[in-house]
Amino acid sequence: MSRAVEQPGSSKVGTGEASGKVILFGEHAVVHGAPALAAGFRPGARARVHGAARDELVVNGEQVERGDALFVALERLRQHLVLPEARCELEVDVPKGAGLGSSAALAVATARALLDLSGRTAKERAVFEAAQAWEGVFHGNPSGVDVAAAQRTGLLSYRRGEDPVDPVLGQPLTLVIAQAGPPASTKLMVEGVAQHKKRNPGQFQRTLEAITAVVQNAEVALRQGALTALGQLLDLNHILLAGWLLSTEDLERAIRVARQAGALGAKLTGAGGGGCIVALSPDQDTAPRIVAALEEQGIRGFVTHVGPPHRDNAP
Ligand code: PMV
């Protein structure tokens, strides 16, 4: 079958969008095969692309140099899709490197835009694989949870190597997300946990099993809308992650402030070592009070609502 090839300089534009993400349960453990619960939220990232003689990359109005990791990621993604060079103008709304999936959101939005430009249907499996090639530039062993969450809005249950599953949500969640401190490198934090596994495999395995049990119980609590139990499970997951040395003074302080202001539970989210916390608000009215209490301590936060799963496209 012949396909019209987009010529460099042509006025045709391809567009794509993707979500930012928050991991509620199971980060790090998901790299080692445990399940995770995450949610995609908008706005995340948007891409506008058109044909060009050479790849060009602009993120939030700033030109990205050839050789920069982001540029390399774009080349890997484009080559994975077997598509011609393009000028890519990307906008990202989630803070970069804070554990909120900015990189995966950029990757998914770009893959969708390039496929749109080429006239090919954006098969979600192809978008996932291409975005994973992009993510591989930043850390060698991505589980895929960030990319899977970037492909949808709302809740998802994810296990490495399997298609995401839609969990049942008894009641929408009101979350507060706050940046507790400077973010750490996901690559380094993932490597730190791998070291831990190597040094103490027995203890590592027990923590992995405990996190798996927390995630499974969280699925039940989500289904039943049991918010108090869900809050306790967030706390428990945080303690287990802290056992892998992923928490910091900044994260502990932000978690304490959120709980004192009425959160039912709170934990680090994403890679840890800094970055963001996620706190569960008992209702919509308490959430702004949690944000205000955090801001009084100089910690910036925002409220997000998690609804039932919604896929952008059929897989
Ligand atoms: O992208 P981050 O920093 O939110 O971390 C992603 C979650 C990890 O479980 C730490 C890594 C992964 O690939 O799943």
Image: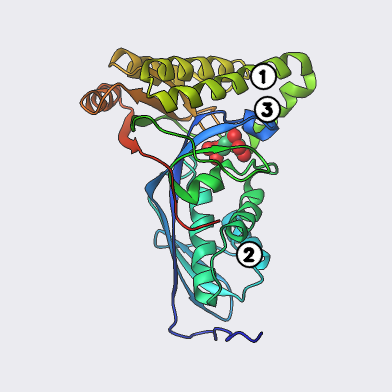
The 10 Å Cα crowd at callout 2, few under 14, some 14 to 19, many 20 or more, is many
The first of marks 2 and 1 along the sequence is 2
Q: CA distance from mark 3 to mark 1?
A: 19 Å
Task: Point out the frontmost of discs 3 and 1.
Answer: 1
Dots 3, 2 in contact, CB < 8 A: no
Examine the rendered structure and indicate whether residue 54 appears above or below residue 211.
below
Kind of residue indicated by mark 1: Glu
State yes or no: Cβ of the residue under disc 1 lies below 8 Å from any atom of ligand 1.
no
Kind of residue indicated by mark 2: Glu
Residue identifier under label 2: 75
Q: CA distance from mark 3 to mark 2?
A: 28 Å
Quarter occupied by the C terminus: bottom right
Find ligand 1 in the image and state its quadrant: top right
Q: Position of residue 47 (x, y in %)?
A: 44, 63
Examine the rendered structure and indicate whether residue 251 appears above or below residue 5.
above
Specify the label residue 209 is tagged with.
1
Determine whether the residue tagged by mark 2 lies in a helix, strand or loop.
Answer: helix
Residue identifier under label 3: 192
Kind of residue indicated by mark 3: Gly
Q: CA distance from mark 2 to mark 1?
A: 38 Å
The front one of 123 and 89 is: 123
Residue visible at 59% across and 76% down in the picture: 54
The first of marks 3 and 2 along the sequence is 2
